Image (cartoon, coloured by chain):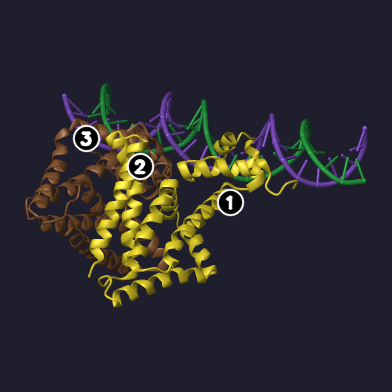
Chain colours: A yellow, B brown, C green, D purple
DNA sequence: CAGCTATTTAATAGAGCTATTAAAAACGGC
DNA sequence: GCCGTTTTTAATAGCTCTATTAAATAGCTG
């Protein structure tokens, strides 16, 4: 190999990422990837052997990217409502910049048991990533015992936040089409949802 | 035609429904549908001409089924918190009985602009179905002016409820696999989420 | 049962897909 | 400029898929 990541190889990866995210595994052909990357179809297999292989690279990469973002506000030591605000903020920002990622990951996790297994193994290999979750649990329980928030299971709180953040983005393309909104109105909508999510959470968690 | 819906025809429809919901449009072949229905592959095309046609029948049928459920608590005239509880109740129950429907509808709406168009036209044809939404808006605004709930836009309230209900079900298969839960623990989880959703909404909407 | 229609079958056209292979082209060091 | 390696290409095997067709079968009616 002449350079560590040849131009073609990374171009294929970029095209694959774009197409897989847009159309999913089944909806994307190696032929289409090659065409988008502007190279011969055989090169896709030359560099990545199989479509499945290439997909895994993209999928795990994106998942790690998401996870890196998610863990930041969970780890940070602040008062509880700041942590909450920080979570909503970070998640919304990530989604604004990567609006198709949550659906991409969801889709593949839901439709393909193999991906769930892959991901599980990924977590089993690195049990220390659990710490993020347990760290979060500890801070929730502390906030409860200090009377800062009402009694709630940490997983529920996580699900509440996740629901309010992710659902807005899953719905976004549907709403856009239904109400004939353009991109600028869409970001308004998302921004509006962010404020409402915070309001609901803050009020809904009071003692 | 001998009987209005021949045995084979409805069997094909049933198999198509099962497989489309499980694997989506791209993931399901007419060959697989025929095999599942226990008939010759050509029959699928004999009765429905194209795969697209067959899919539309399934999709619109399921969407109507969902919509019929959704509108019930929106229309009912009760005090606002009862309406809210009723909504969460009905939606959760529907999802427990049709756990794969929300993802199925989501998936096709998100990935296929044509489906969004189809659905939009469906609504445009029957503008009276708008009334359900406007009826709901009216009851929200009444509740606000009466000081029963805090100030909130009706669409936000709808999104809040939708988020908290639907997200639980989208996550369910992922959580099952991750935590090695069996079906009984899963329904516990869902039931638990239902209570938390209600708590969050009731508290989060107080003045 | 004869004739008509509805249903079912096997066969196949025609397309697209993944993956492989053998040969050609590009590139590097010597 | 030559040689070995890496990269790229065209060709193709071997699938699977949708949709159609012509022929066979079943079912009803008079």
Image: B37 above or below D10: below
- N-terminal label among 1 and 2: 1
Q: Nearer the viewer, residue B50 or A53?
A: A53
Nearest to the eye among marks 1 and 3: give it.
3
Give the crowd class for mark 2: few <14, some 14-19, many >=20 residues within 10 Å: some
Q: Taking B37 as reference, is A27 left or right? A: right
Residue A53 has which mark?
A: 1
Q: Mark 2 points at which residue?
A: A187
Give residue B23's position: percent from left, percent from top. 40, 48
Q: Mark 2 lies on which chain?
A: A
Give residue B155's position: percent from left, percent from top. 22, 46
Q: Which residue is drawn at 14% across and 46% down?
A: B136
Task: Give the Cα separation between the discs numbered 1 and 2.
Answer: 35 Å
Give residue A117's position: percent from left, percent from top. 48, 62
Give residue B128's position: percent from left, percent from top. 14, 35
At numbered mark 2, what does the secondary structure look like: helix, strand or loop? helix
Q: Name the residue under label 3.
A: B123
Q: Residue at x 47, y 55 (%)?
A: A66
Residue A42 has which mark?
A: none
Task: Give the Cα separation between the discs numbered 2 and 3.
Answer: 25 Å
Q: Which chain carries label 1?
A: A
User: Quarter holding the C terminus of chain B?
Assistant: bottom left
Q: Residue at x 29, y 57 (%)?
A: A198
């Amino acid at each position: 190999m002449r350079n560590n990541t040849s131009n073609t190889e990374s171009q294929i990866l970029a095209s694959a990422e774009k197409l897989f995210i847009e159309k999913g595994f089944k909806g994307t052909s190696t032929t289409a990837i090659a065409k988008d990357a502007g190279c011969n179809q055989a090169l896709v297999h030359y560099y990545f052997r199989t479509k499945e292989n290439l997909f895994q690279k993209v999928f795990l990469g994106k998942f790690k990217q998401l996870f890196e973002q998610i863990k930041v506000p969970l780890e940070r030591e602040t008062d509880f409502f700041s942590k909450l605000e920080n979570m909503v903020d970070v998640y919304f920002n990530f989604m604004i910049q990567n609006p198709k990622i949550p659906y991409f990951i969801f889709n593949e996790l839901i439709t393909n048991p193999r991906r769930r297994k892959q991901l599980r193994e990924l977590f089993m290999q690195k049990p220390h990533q659990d710490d993020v979750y347990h760290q979060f649990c500890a801070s929730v329980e502390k906030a409860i015992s200090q009377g800062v928030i009402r009694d709630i299971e940490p997983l529920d709180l996580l699900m509440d936040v996740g629901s309010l953040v992710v659902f807005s983005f899953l719905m976004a393309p549907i709403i856009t089409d239904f109400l004939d909104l353009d991109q600028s109105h869409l970001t308004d909508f998302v921004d509006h949802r962010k404020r409402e999510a915070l309001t609901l959470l803050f009020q809904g968690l009071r003692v």
